[in-house]
Amino acid sequence: MTDSLTLPHPAMASGVPSSVPPGPGLPRLLPDAGTVPVDLRAHLATHGPLRAAGGGDGLLREVAAAGLTGRGGAAFPVARKLAAAAEVRPAPVVAGNGAEGEPASSKDRSLLWLSPHLVLDGLQLAAGAVGSRSAVLYVPRNERLHIRLAGAIAERAAAGMDAASVELVTAPDRFLAGEESALVSRLAGRPALPAYRPVRGLPRLAPGRAALVQNVETLAHLALIGRYGAAWFREAGTEAEPGTMLATLHLADGRTSVTEVPLGTSLAGLLGLDGGPGPAEAGAAGPGVPSAFGPVQAVLVGGYHGAWLPAAAAALPLANAALRPLGAAVGAGVLAALPADRCGLAETARVARYLALESAGQCGPCFNGLPRIAAAMAHLAGPRPDPRARADLERWAGLVTGRGACHHPDGSVRFIRSALRVFAAETGLHEQGRCSGTDPRPFLPVPATSPATEEDWS
Amino acid sequence: MTGITSSTALWYASRATGVVTLLLLTAVVLLGILVNRQGRLPGLPGFAVTGLHRNVSLLAVAFLAIHVVTAIADPYVTIGLAAAVLPFASAYKPIWLGLGAISLDLVAALILTSLARARMSRRAWRAIHWLGYAAWPLAVVHSIGSSADARSGLVLGVLVACVLATVAALAWRLSQAAREIPRAGRAAAALNRMSARKAGLR
């Protein structure tokens, strides 16, 4: 964590209506101590009992005023999703999505481990807002986490706190397991594979049985908005993108941490980069911008469906308004500072191979196209690649975009195309038989196993 | 009739576009079988075959539209708009034109469901797409029945070639059905293929 995070946000000094207890400072979601999980007693001592501001419709209005967006990556306005779900009869199943298939992200796991009751509060609020009595918490397959969450759910049920029953469902350890339609498929008792989803309306488990899916961090924010209101929520973040978000940081020295940051915080500050370099360096990965954790050549924003940016772009804030013009997005808050001594092409090729193998094997353009693209990327990462390979990659990338049931091909191609832009100079070096990477150790985390049977998705 | 005059132009146009449509529809069926079995064409990546299948089918629809419109507009025989889409509603060669009308309707269903594919369930789309196997033979029989030209000479040769190619592709498709890769292994199998042909980037 950087120092700025432990300081109260400047906006916190402003007055809060006296009828409402002052909301927590930063961090909001994770306990101050950082590593000690919050049990039910401590949770109630800090936040008091669950409250929905205004009750019923009041919560919807409050969430709309807060401008909360989904923290699973898509940043969809939560109020709109809740309002749509409230119209659906019979009431939808409310699902908290903590699958976090992205290997580079661990913020949902951390949140579930450290602050389970905020997530469970949010799940109850969302269920109450849409009139549902049935909720599901979808979590990674991890025995310790499972035991803790089952205990927390049982403890709340015994105390009679919750109106909606909560069921724990485990997600397979797959990249796409947290995709909304994959989650819905898993809840319906099928393998957790993505499907074509309705263009409008909620996804359905079965005819007449819709699901409202929200990321677990989104639910935790919802729990706090219910208690402290929209004005408090907006004290952090930017006007257009209010609030805080959990980010998983991969620093240039190889360390990883989960931290809570207000949206709009500069990437450079989060990754310990020293100021912004001159505009001359913008556009491509340079020899390395110094950081507190070693020189950095490029920054990965938004994880493996995100985009590489040159280190010069780290002067930008963590906000979609600033990142979208560069083809990047905040996503689920994965930020990685690639050290100057690694080969960006080799890193991209490793991840591209992983993404190809994680294809669900359902849509031809994905399961034929991504392996071909990954093989070409590996070719580029090797010595003296065919100079035509770059153009081939671009062409194939165009052929798979928008051609899947889910966004796996689109996201994977966004990531690979950004590497071709940012590491263009490195590609030139490889064509001459050289490589600027001196450290062959992998930097970005990639799981070793890939799906082999249908059971790997259930 | 000898030569193209203002009174025969529509007739010739309708005949010619009919033949071209049949050729294109045959290509669509062949490419569709290739897509379904993850087959390849020399010089094309596997997934580009899917794009070709789609684009050729749209081209076929364009020719089919001209074929139908010119047949309706041609004053030599009276074929109403209704007869073009409603089976057996035509006074002229009701059976043969009726089969063409059914084929036209099926093709329209295929195209419309494919354009709306993202908005419908995969299962329903697949079920309707299977109708392609009915639309093609109907079109062939329609060609033979409604046109005397198709019973001899060059046009007959084209027809026979189309039928032979489709039958061969179908036989190949059935022989391939037994060797289907389960979806869990598809990406890995493709990646292995790519690694095996390391230098074969093109």
Image (tube, coloured by chain):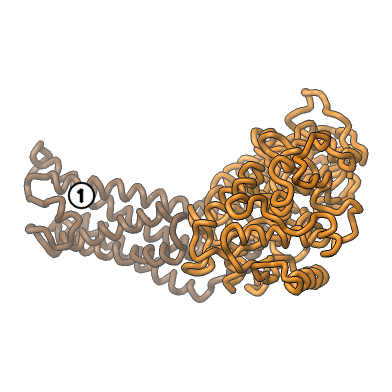
Chain colours: A orange, B brown
Give the answer, above or below, for where A192 lies relative to B7.
Answer: below
Answer whether residue A266 is visible to the viewer in this image: no
Q: Tell me if mark 1 has few (under 14), some (14-19) or many (20+) residues whose alpha carbon lies within 10 angstroms of its own.
A: many
Q: Secondary structure at mark 1?
A: helix
> Can you tell which quarter of the image residue B23 is in?
bottom left
Tell me which residue sits at (20%, 58%) in the image.
Answer: B101
Whole-percent x, y for residue A454 in the image: 63, 73
Tell me which residue sits at (16%, 59%) in the image.
Answer: B97
Whole-percent x, y for residue A355 in the image: 68, 56
| Left or right: where A67 falls relative to A423 | left
Whole-percent x, y for residue B194 in the image: 64, 57
Answer whether residue A130 is visible to the viewer in this image: yes
- Residue identifier under label 1: B68
Give the answer, above or below, for where A151 lies relative to A182.
Answer: below
> Can you tell which quarter of the image residue A147 is in?
bottom right
Is residue A328 or residue B179 the one in the foreground? A328
Quadrant including the C terminus of chain A: bottom right
Give the chain of mark 1. B
Quadrant including the N terminus of chain A: top right
| Left or right: where B153 falls relative to B172 | left
Whole-percent x, y for residue A377 in the image: 69, 48
Which amino acid does the dot numbered 1 rest on? Val
